[in-house]
Image (cartoon, grey):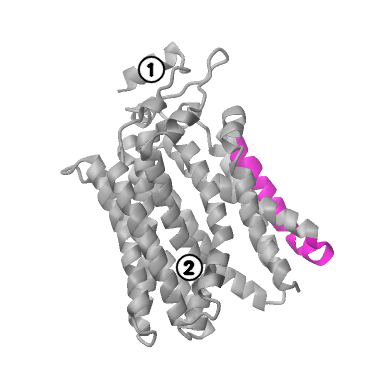
Amino acid sequence: MFTLNQQSALFSAIAVGTFVGSVPLTYLISKFKFRNMFTFYGILSSIATLLTPWAAYTNFYLLVVLRISQGLAVAISFVSMAAICNAWSPLQSSGFFLSFLSCSYQLSMMFTMPIAGELCESRYGWPSVFYLQGTLSAIVLFIFYYFYRDQARQQSYVSQQEIAAIELGKIKAIQDKKSKQKVPYQAMCKDTAVWGVLSASSGSLISYYLFVLYGPIYLNKTLKMDIEKTGLANAIPYGLSIAAKLLAGPLSDRITCISEKTRIIILSCISQFGTAGCFIALKFLPTNYHSLVQASFTASTVFNGLIHVGVFKGNQLMSQHLASVIQSWNAIISSIVVLVIPIFVSVLAPDNTPQEWGRIFLTIAGYMFAVGTFYSFTAKVKPRPWTEEKELSTKTRAQAVSAK
């Protein structure tokens, strides 16, 4: 239906939408609140999804615009984990909360891939996939907007005891008409702890999108697995990743025999170094050892998913109410990664041979070892000084101190 250049443009449009949606997101959330912006971004994405089949047969440039609109949902999804966790999770349960929320990435893949395959082969054809996804998204957004509130105390279903548990130990940035907190961008950019989070996140995003975008191609073209086995092999890691995160999340909250910082560093090292080790195994394992290669392929996805209870939890603890700002920066990194990976793969593995993919695996493994080590030396879990800026009102300061 489309030329290779058009396919490339449609693919890149999602990343462009993520970038465009991420840049103003912090300002928009501060002005219009997270609940409203999440719903707005989601509605744009749902409408774009519903209109995609029509645009595909009508106008290519309109289709590109719709794909950019779909990318907005990716931007808000990064911020949503930090914003929702800060508003609704007790500090001592943040590991489980983040791991549970992050399962949406794997669940979406596990739902979409088999459903899309069935619908594409049915009499309804490929447009039905977009109609189903767009309709379901709209329904879920309605449910979200009806029940969700930006603060637990705004929801009538939450008791005072629950509110106290959620807010215990948190720095609350309460904004009123006389005093608003400005985002301390300069202080944040000078903090090595922030750069540690961003660098570790970039390594995780590179390894994640490498297999999201090229996992089936690697299994089919390089390992010579048939299409049916490729689909199953590409789906298994997501289910195991969910199980690993739901196990690691509560453990990261409840193992108190070691300090919070040590737990964060251990989990981040398991995630970063574990993924890198699997990539090294994929480089040196003979391609005819399908079982071992599949195990390494699966384990890399499982290890990578643990970043949510390591690096991202550390970000939540140190950044408090400003964690969503750093997550919006991670969304920008994500858009850049999605744009760069196709170029990276086409340069290093133009023929999809095992030797070429070996170079890719070693390069990414080296990068992940580097950023994982850097994060280990810069990781922080106590609220950073810039979380309590001078712009906070006296009332806010008193409430922050009393919460401690």
Magenta part, dominant SS: helix
Q: Residue sitting at 69 percent across and 56 percent down?
A: 67
The residue lying at 61 percent from left, 35 percent from top is 36
Tell me where residue 20 sits by quadrant: top right
| Disc with the residue nearer the chain's start (2 vs 1) | 2
| SS class, disc 1 | helix
Q: In the image, residue 92 lies at what x, y percent?
A: 30, 38
Neighbour class for label 2 at 10 Å: few (<14), some, many (≥20)? Answer: some
Does residue 344 belong to the magenta stretch? no
Residue receiving disc 1: 399
- Residue 382 x/y as whole percent: 30, 33
Instruction: Tell me which segment is drawn in magenta.
Output: 36-60
Q: Position of residue 29 (x, y in %)?
A: 58, 33
Which amino acid type is shown beneath numbered disc 2?
Phe
Quadrant location of the N terminus in the rendered image: bottom right
Name the residue tied to disc 2: 211
Front residue (pair 338, 163): 338
